[in-house]
Amino acid sequence: MLSHIFDSHSHYDSSQFDGIRYTLLDEMFSQGLAGIIHASTDYGSAIFGIETAKRYERFYTSIGIHPEAASRTSDSDLKSIYPIVKKDKVVAVGEIGLDYHYEGYDRERQIYLFKEQIKLALDNDLPVIVHSREATLDTMEILNQFKPRGVVHCFSGSAETAKEVLALGMYIGLTGVVTFKNNKKAKSVLEVLPADRFLLETDCPYMAPEPFRGKTCISTMIEHTAKKSAEIMGLDPLELLKITEQNAKTLFNIK
């Protein structure tokens, strides 16, 4: 199964991987892992993605400013990412979007950065990787306004919102949360989600699936997410892994 696991959203620059990062990546790729996309969160994270993509043939990166970084991101910081979207193996603009979970976040600044980065993606014919937490109405309004290609990652919305995302031609990414016994919402999304619009992801080091819940997540754990997703969707797990691998390559234009 490893040869068809494509992790469409990861954060291997996280401090949880300090001291083991490259040993872990070496091991997973040597075992045949199909691919990993690094989701950038700021300029430094973007540089990590570009440099790591040089090191591994099947490692790719996105370039973007995460909404949690909005309040500390100046216009000059934003413009600093513009030239590097043209670098080799940059396959998307992301992780961008809106996050209204914590009080004190500058919503207007998030909205501004989200829109500007969607424009950047459109100008460079790149898909977007969208983060949306407790911000469904504003996220969907902006996506309907600009209609970018891309994926709403770590999808936490309802089946009805999933249908709206699909109607825009976008993909939906799901993590290990689909394996959690109390996550009825993820199950309802999988029941309406066509296999050819589904991306498997870890969001590692977070969102480890059962039986690893609460531990540091890594890309090979997608096998467990795939098995549970396939069960809900009425598919064979290996078939689903092959489909989602191709979906990732199609969306991110990976040959």
Image (tube, rainbow, N blue to C red):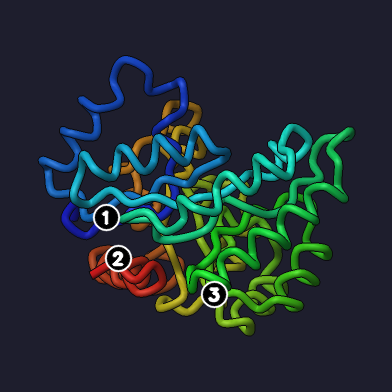
The residue that disc 2 covers is 245
Q: Quadrant of residue 159?
A: bottom right
- Residue drawn at x 74%, y 78% as measured from the top left: 144
Query: Does the residue at mark 1 contact the one at mark 3 (Cβ under 8 Å)?
Result: no
Q: Nearer the viewer, residue 185 or 41?
A: 41
Mark 2 residue type: Glu
Q: Nearer the viewer, mark 3 or mark 2?
A: 3
Q: Give the numbered dot on residue 250.
A: none
- Residue drawn at x 53%, y 45% as measured from the top left: 180
Counting from the top left corner in percent of width and height, residue 20 is at: 28, 20
Q: Quadrant of the N terminus?
A: bottom left
Q: Nearer the viewer, residue 26 or 3?
A: 26
Q: Is residue 101 left or right of residue 213?
A: right
Query: Does the residue at mark 3 contact the one at mark 2 (Cβ under 8 Å)?
Result: no
Element class at badge 1 = loop
Q: Nearer the viewer, mark 1 or mark 3?
A: 3
Q: Quadrant of residue 38?
A: top left
In the image, residue 19 sits, relative to residue 104, either above or below, namely above
The residue that disc 1 covers is 5
The residue that disc 3 covers is 149
In the image, residue 57 sits, relative to residue 151, either above or below, namely above
Total number of numbered discs in the rendering? 3
Counting from the top left corner in percent of width and height, residue 120 is at: 60, 64
Mark 3 residue type: Arg
Query: Does the residue at mark 2 contact the one at mark 1 (Cβ under 8 Å)?
Result: yes
Q: Earlier in the sequence, mark 1 or mark 3?
A: 1
Q: Is residue 228 left or right of residue 160?
A: left
Q: How much space separates mark 3 and mark 2, taking CA atoms?
A: 17 Å
Q: How much space separates mark 2 and mark 1, taking CA atoms?
A: 6 Å
- Residue drawn at x 39%, y 41% as measured from the top left: 49
Q: Earlier in the sequence, mark 2 or mark 1?
A: 1
